Amino acid sequence: MKYPIIENDHTEKPETVDIETIKEDLLRPIKKIGPAGKIWIASLILICLIGAYAYYLQLKNGLEVTSMRNYASWGIYISSFVYFVAISLVGALISSILKLLNFEWYRPLARIAETIAVANIICAGLIIVVDMGRPDRVFNLFTHGRVQSPILWDVMVVSSYLITSLLFLYFSLLPSLGMLRDQLKNKPRWQMKMYKFLALGWEGNEKQSARLKKSIRFICILIIPLAISIHTVTAWLFATTLRPGWNSTNFGPYFVAGAFLAGTGAVIIGMFVFQKVYHLQKYITDYHFDNMGKLLVFLGLIYAYFNINEYLIPAYSSRSSEALLLNDMFLGTSSHLFWFTQSIGMILPVILLLFRKMRKPLPMTIIAVFIVIGAWLKRYLIVIPVLLHPYLPIQGVPKSWTSYFPSWIEIAIVLAFISASLLFITIFSRLFPIISIADIIEGKEKKL
């Protein structure tokens, strides 16, 4: 069966695309992994193993092998936790909101966004365990947790968002699983059994399709408040702590706006990589990059508004503790990192993306890389300088306690988590179509 595809109003002769060609294009990455793919996977596994060894040393010798002390008691583990939570928010933005609003251009991007969301929320949950000196006590949060504690709120909302994100990804994957079960014949037996088990008897009839659409729509509605609440509650962990720079009612929307910006940048990087590596130029086009660029400008302006709110009010009131922190951020030891982060993570991307030429795939991806780097550095600045400026400084402690630079063990563990996130996305895309075949076909049918 062939369907005409109308790219725009200026197309003189509609191009016809065979559905079998669509299946072949989108199943190609699953059928064969080249040498470059194997080297990439092996490199990520190696980084994860180095991180696992570093964590073994931390478990063996205690948190004293890190640079965390009484001042900087959280370090880059918590910075990375906030970063992973921020990136995971993008699944709700791309998949749920655009789907509910019937934006057709979301179709090739939805599964990329959902996979990034699941990978990062898993890493967010696990890195909290790494931050604990006694990881065996994590179960006490579930057995002896106090409702008054924001930490329990965060555990509950992270767990709920993880389960909902997994269901969202799995439900949208069901038609592809039925296709993989029926059409792939030369894969290992364990892989075929996995497809058969996960497909749950999917046949694609009208009754099953109707139920699936209702289920996905329900999760689309459910996941939006969950996604917003997960980063809001994470912000409350800071805002309910009496520290200069954290005690702010602006923190909830400030965190959410920053998360949308960072997550969208991560999806753009994923779009570019999958387009080039898996040769998906027919499905992820310049049109998609242009729309994502416009979305980034919108989100960047919202984030800029909350940044102004976050710094203008304490700077204007100039209370002594807030003034010391802001002076350090604007003009002191943290100023270079602060202005670099604000520039590459927000100001320059918004300005550059106003120009159409910068919304092409390559320049947009370079901009997105800087946004994602800036997002991590921003979380570092939210955590570390504040901890180094307490209301009541400790007296008579070593000078090293009043500064912080992560040890190699902390760096190795954080890099391992970033690699684990990339490894999850890579392996997922090698086992399942990274673009929903059913969504693409449905989109073509709507154009008839």
Image (cartoon, rainbow, N blue to C red):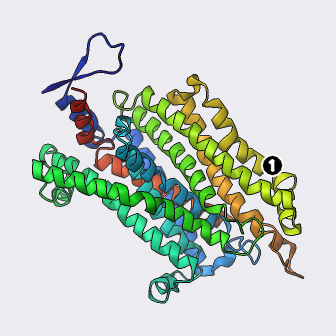
Residue 155 percent location from the top left of the image: 49, 74
**Residue at x 62%, y 51% (from the top left corner):** 375
Q: Is residue 7 above or below residue 438?
A: above
User: Can residue 49 be seen at all in this image of the molecule?
Assistant: no
User: Can residue 428 be seen at all in this image of the molecule?
Assistant: yes
Q: Nearer the viewer, residue 34 or 351?
A: 351
**Residue at x 51%, y 85% (from the top left corner):** 137
Residue 90 percent location from the top left of the image: 47, 51
Residue 101 percent location from the top left of the image: 38, 43
Give SS at disc 1.
Answer: helix
Residue 202 percent location from the top left of the image: 13, 54
Task: Specify the quadrant that holds the C terminus.
Answer: top left
Tell me the residue that label 1 is attached to: 336
Q: Nearer the viewer, residue 260 or 40?
A: 260
**Residue at x 63%, y 42% (from the top left corner):** 301
Q: Disc 1 residue type?
A: His
Image quadrant where residue 297 sits? top right
Q: Nearer the viewer, residue 32 or 374?
A: 374
**Residue at x 77%, y 74% (from the top left corner):** 71
User: What is the residue that sits farthest to the bottom in this orientation?
Assistant: 144
Task: Specify the quadrant that holds the N terminus.
Answer: top left
